Amino acid sequence: MNTPSPDYLLGNTDEEHQRLIRQAKRIAPITESFFREAGIGPGQRVLDLGSGVGDVAMLAAKLVGPSGEVVGVERDTRSIARAIRRAADAGYHNVTFRQTDVAQISSYKPFDAVVGRYILQFLPDPVGVVRSLSKLLNPGGVVAFQEPCWVPFLQLCRDLPLWSAGASLIYETSHRAGVNMRMGLTLHKVFQEAGLPAPKMHMEVPLGNDPDFTRWIPDVLCAVRPQIEQFRLSLDAVGDLDTLPARLQKEVAASHSVVPWFGIVGAWSRTGTT
């Protein structure tokens, strides 16, 4: 199996950690509902792939309760140290984190579920990863992933020039960096090629207009600015990144409407079923 390249697109800076925490807070209800639908609950042993700073692992820890266990795996040293501190501060004693590569995950004891959010899009071989991880599950174990779909995002923001320009620049930068920007809808094929039954799927598109919602685009653009420069893409359409949050908020406020985030596609299936 392959892993994300060492030059992870969004980086692992303190600023990126804070962006991830803000993002996780906003979409936590969507992920929690998705996990509950997939059957993740008390007493289960769950593997969280690509834990980052720990938000998905802690959410799963809440669902499985004190009688359950969550193991989060993450490659980056700084991210996993942050995740360990955050879980301890939040009082989650049923979650542990391992620093490891996805190709080296092993367990003396099978899991009841393997989960992940926004991780398969960065992997060159998501089919191989899902196939390998499914072998770590008990019969009937759950495989549940959430991945983005950018098609509705780009289409729904066309009437707002600045928002659309920012979204398009993020899309183009990520695409050139090798990120699968259609991974959400691709999950249906990935699961089946990995030997799993066709997954149950749905997509949600968050909408909002408050400053915390609209700052997402400037935050991501700042994170990927080195790649924007590397690919010689132009920032002219979005202008100065320091003033972009205020200008975006002004545009959205003037529209008297809401703007979309990218679609969040959830797909889950069980091993050993037909």
Image (cartoon, rainbow, N blue to C red):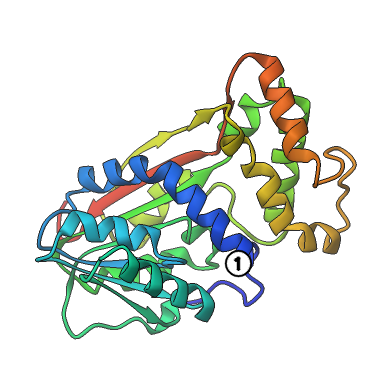
Residue in view at x 84 percent, y 64 percent: 230
User: x, y percentage for residue 252?
Assistant: 67, 23
* Above-or-below relation of 20 to 79: above
Give 94 or 238, whichever is nearer the viewer. 94
Q: Quadrant of residue 145?
A: bottom left
Q: Secondary structure at mark 1?
A: helix
Side of 123 where 165 appears, left or right: right
* Above-or-below relation of 99 to 244: below
Residue in view at x 78 percent, y 39 percent: 244
Residue in view at x 70 percent, y 61 percent: 177
* Above-or-below relation of 260 to 39: above
User: x, y percentage for residue 29?
Assistant: 34, 40
Residue hosting label 1:
14
Name the residue at the top extreme. Answer: 256
Could one spot residue 115 in this view of the protein?
no
Side of 133 where 273 appears, left or right: left
Q: Amino acid at mark 1?
A: Asp
Mark 1: give few (<14), some (14-19) or many (20+) Cα within 10 Å. Answer: few
Give 9 or 65, whichever is nearer the viewer. 65
Side of 115 where 109 appears, left or right: left
User: x, y percentage for residue 14?
Assistant: 60, 66
Give 98 or 145, whichever is nearer the viewer. 98
Q: Quadrant of residue 19?
A: bottom right
Name the residue at the front extreme. Answer: 89
User: x, y percentage for residue 64?
Assistant: 16, 59
Residue in view at x 60 percent, y 16 percent: 257
* Above-or-below relation of 242 to 192: above
Side of 238 where 105 appears, left or right: left
Q: Quadrant of residue 72?
A: bottom left
Give 195 or 21, whichever is nearer the viewer. 21
